[in-house]
Image (tube, rainbow, N blue to C red):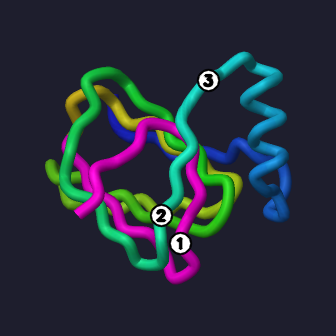
Amino acid sequence: MIPKKYRWAKTYEAGESELISLLEAKNIETDRWVAEEFETFEPHVYETDARIWCAEGSIAYTFTADGKTIPLQAGDALDIPANTFHDAIAGFAGAICYGPTPIKK
């Protein structure tokens, strides 16, 4: 399995309240975390498959194996397979995301 990006929101004006409603409707419990502007996260892996939802701002994930970078903005989600090394950097406005909390530098 490879990382996969997709839209969870139908519009580009989506925000955190819309994501919360979606997660509640699907009975998904996950962590909320905030990244400051240009905050970087250490390379790390998740032991199980992970899904990251971007509620506000932007963040880019870079995958160690191939160097591929996948940017996320509000309304995007990213599936990360278990044991896939990656790091991340938030955009100029930071980000509010839901999913496993990454390791901050």
Which residue is label 1 attached to? 94
> To which residue does mark 2 refer?
35
Which amino acid type corresponds to the residue marked 2 in the rendered image? Ala
* Residue sitting farthest toward the left: 65
CA gap between label 3 and label 1 equals 23 Å
Looking at marks 3 and 1 on the same chain, the residue that comes earlier in the sequence is marked by 3
Q: Position of residue 31 (x, y in %)?
A: 53, 36
Specify start and end residues of the magenta stretch as a single range. Answer: 85-105
Q: Which quadrant is home to the C terminus?
A: bottom left
- State yes or no: discs 1 and 2 in contact (Cβ < 8 Å): yes
Q: Where does the image place residue 56, in percent across and percent down from the top left?
A: 67, 62
Image disc number at residue 29:
3
Q: Within the magenta stretch, is there residue 96?
A: yes
Indicate the position of residue 28 as horizontal and vertical percent values. Answer: 65, 22
- Cα gap from disc 3 to disc 2, whole angstroms: 20 Å
Q: Secondary structure at mark 1?
A: strand
- Taking the spot 67% from the left edge, 54% from the top edge, the residue there is 55
First reached walking from the N terminus: tag 3 or tag 2: 3
Considering the image in quadrants, where does the N terminus appear? Answer: top left
Q: Amino acid at mark 1?
A: Gly
Given the image, on which type of amino acid does mark 3 rest? Glu
N-terminal of the two: label 1 or label 2?
Answer: 2
Instruction: Please tell me whether residue 71 is drawn above or below residue 23 in the rendered image.
Output: below
